[in-house]
């Protein structure tokens, strides 16, 4: 077993930061990183180095954006070149059209696009547009799905089960203090991946709903692929009741396939949102939608603005990243998926050898690890009832001490730059970590 890492300077900087930055961190999920929120000096491809000189194989990958790994040369070079001519124009540029043409050729849903900076932002645009187009105010959100941190969507992401209500009619549980009273008034909460229950919800609320907002593959809870027929049934219900179907592809877009979850599942929504992998690590989000719906943004009946929308650096990164993928998309995604599958199979193997209840679920490009006796998790409540999160946190800390950085929630992101040696290193670290916990 390698010598375990030390974190002396990380602890020193974290203590100093707590005097100046709220909680010592700039995003709440980082607080859960153990033994202390880490401070990094640099990162390249599949590796990161912290202020104590510790080297990590990284599977956080910025929580998903770094599909090519950290600081890929082709993006660094493109952005460095293009930003010499300006940063933020608050105006249009031909680069925006080049990126859009690539996107429209890749995504099954065809129509105009709009750009913003984050997944949270673009999901808010989608909700506003759905309400404007349908004239209805309510929308359907599923337990376990995450669509950003704003008041209108920060409900029932990971609610305590004792507060969540009945499976068939969940209660909207706020994720935070300070959410404006009444923010849940127009939200209908439902369990995900159960078509009979969804049909009942539509029979009760369908004529009031502007839209259904869903992760088409549930990456924020266990990387759950929908049951056969579920998304097709959801599409049919939306059509029957005049409800817009919105796919939140912030994680899945350009990661699970060139055409995202739409391509994998064979179901097209009315609107779809993207971020993360779209610009290979730069802040960029996008919505694409059917022309008749997007027309309301085009003529200003539904307002959307943003100083940093389609800024030079983010659009340059998107062009470079998409160009890299489009050189041979079949090979790119085949290689990415095969890297992930080798890692998944290796983790399963060492889990079995250790007689551990380690469970690995998901796709090659992104998956989850849990500790549970169940072979498969089907929805949020299934996860909440059966997965040992405290044990996962001990596993993640043991992996960190062995040079493998994992996310605090269990989701892994594989990059095209992860090497065979790094995957083998990860599998051996998991063997040691499982023995330690």
Image (tube, rainbow, N blue to C red):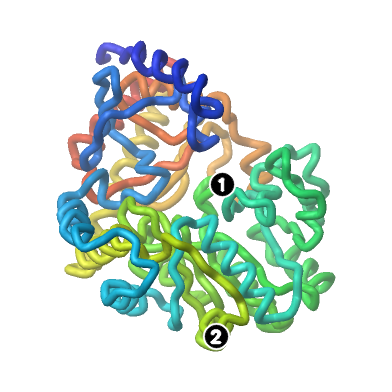
Residue 16 occupies which quadrant of the picture? top left
Decide if residue 168 is in sight here: no
Crowding at label 1, few (<14), some or many (≥20) Cα neighbours within 10 Å? Answer: many
Q: Residue at x 58, y 83 (%)?
A: 296
Give the x, y percent position of residue 346.
32, 37
Give the x, y percent position of residue 232.
58, 74
Camera-nearest residue between 151 and 58: 151
Crowding at label 2, few (<14), some or many (≥20) Cα neighbours within 10 Å? Answer: few
Give the x, y percent position of residue 377.
58, 46
Alpha carbon distance from label 1 to label 2: 38 Å
* For residue 435, side relative to residue 172 (left or right): left
* For residue 359, side relative to residue 185 (left or right): left
Camera-nearest residue between 394 and 171: 171
Q: Residue at x 31, y 41 (%)?
A: 343
Residue labelled with disc 2: 299
Q: Secondary structure at mark 1?
A: loop
Task: Please identify the quadrant where the N terminus is shown.
Answer: top left
Extreme bottom residue here?
292
Residue labelled with disc 1: 221
Q: Secondary structure at mark 2?
A: loop
Figure check: 383 above or below 48: below
Residue 251 occupies which quadrant of the picture? bottom left
Give the x, y percent position of residue 41.
27, 29
In the rendered structure, which disc, 1 or 2, sits on the residue that comes first in sequence?
1
Figure check: 28 above or below 83: above
* For residue 255, side relative to residue 16 (left or right): left
Camera-nearest residue between 280 and 300: 300
Q: Are marks 1 and 2 in contact (CB under 8 Å)?
A: no
Q: Nearer the viewer, mark 1 or mark 2?
A: 2
């Amino acid at each position: 077993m390698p010598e375990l890492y030390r974190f002396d300077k990380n602890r020193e900087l974290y203590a100093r930061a707590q005097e100046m930055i709220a909680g010592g961190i700039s995003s709440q999920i980082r607080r859960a990183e153990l033994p202390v929120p880490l401070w990094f000096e640099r990162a390249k491809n599949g590796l990161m180095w912290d202020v104590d000189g510790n080297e990590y194989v990284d599977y956080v990958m910025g929580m998903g954006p770094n599909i090519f790994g950290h600081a890929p040369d082709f993006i660094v070079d493109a952005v460095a070149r293009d930003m010499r001519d300006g940063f933020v124009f608050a105006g249009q540029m031909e680069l925006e059209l080049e990126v859009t043409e690539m996107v429209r050729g890749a995504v099954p849903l065809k129509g105009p696009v709009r750009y913003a900076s984050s997944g949270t932002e673009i999901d808010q645009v989608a909700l506003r547009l759905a309400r404007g187009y349908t004239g209805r105010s309510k929308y359907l959100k599923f337990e376990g799905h995450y669509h950003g941190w704003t008041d209108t969507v920060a409900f029932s992401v990971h609610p305590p089960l004792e507060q969540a209500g009945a499976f068939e009619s969940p209660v909207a549980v706020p994720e935070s203090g300070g959410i404006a009273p009444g923010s849940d008034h127009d939200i209908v909460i439902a369990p995900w991946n159960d078509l009979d229950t969804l049909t009942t919800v539509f029979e009760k609320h369908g004529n009031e709903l502007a839209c259904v907002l869903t992760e088409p593959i549930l990456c924020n809870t266990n990387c759950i692929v929908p049951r056969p027929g579920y998304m097709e049934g959801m599409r049919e219900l939306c059509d029957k009741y005049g409800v817009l179907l919105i796919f939140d592809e912030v994680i899945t877009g350009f990661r699970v396939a060139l055409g995202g979850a739409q391509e994998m599942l064979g179901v097209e929504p009315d609107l779809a949102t993207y971020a993360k992998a779209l610009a290979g690590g730069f802040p960029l989000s996008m919505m694409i939608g059917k022309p008749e719906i997007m027309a309301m943004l085009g003529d200003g009946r539904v307002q959307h603005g943003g100083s940093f929308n389609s800024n030079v650096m983010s659009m340059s990164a998107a062009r470079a990243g998409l160009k890299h993928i489009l050189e041979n998309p079949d090979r790119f995604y085949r290689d990415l998926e095969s890297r992930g599958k080798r890692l998944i199979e290796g983790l399963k193997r060492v889990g079995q050898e250790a007689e551990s209840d380690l469970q690995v679920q998901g796709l090659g490009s992104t998956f989850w690890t849990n500790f549970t006796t169940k072979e498969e998790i089907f929805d949020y409540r299934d996860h909440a009832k059966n997965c040992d999160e405290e044990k996962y946190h001990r596993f993640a800390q043991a992996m960190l001490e062995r040079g493998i950085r994992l996310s605090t929630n269990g989701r892994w992101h594989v990059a095209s730059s992860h090497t065979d040696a790094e995957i083998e290193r990860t599998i051996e670290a998991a063997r040691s970590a499982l023995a330690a916990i």
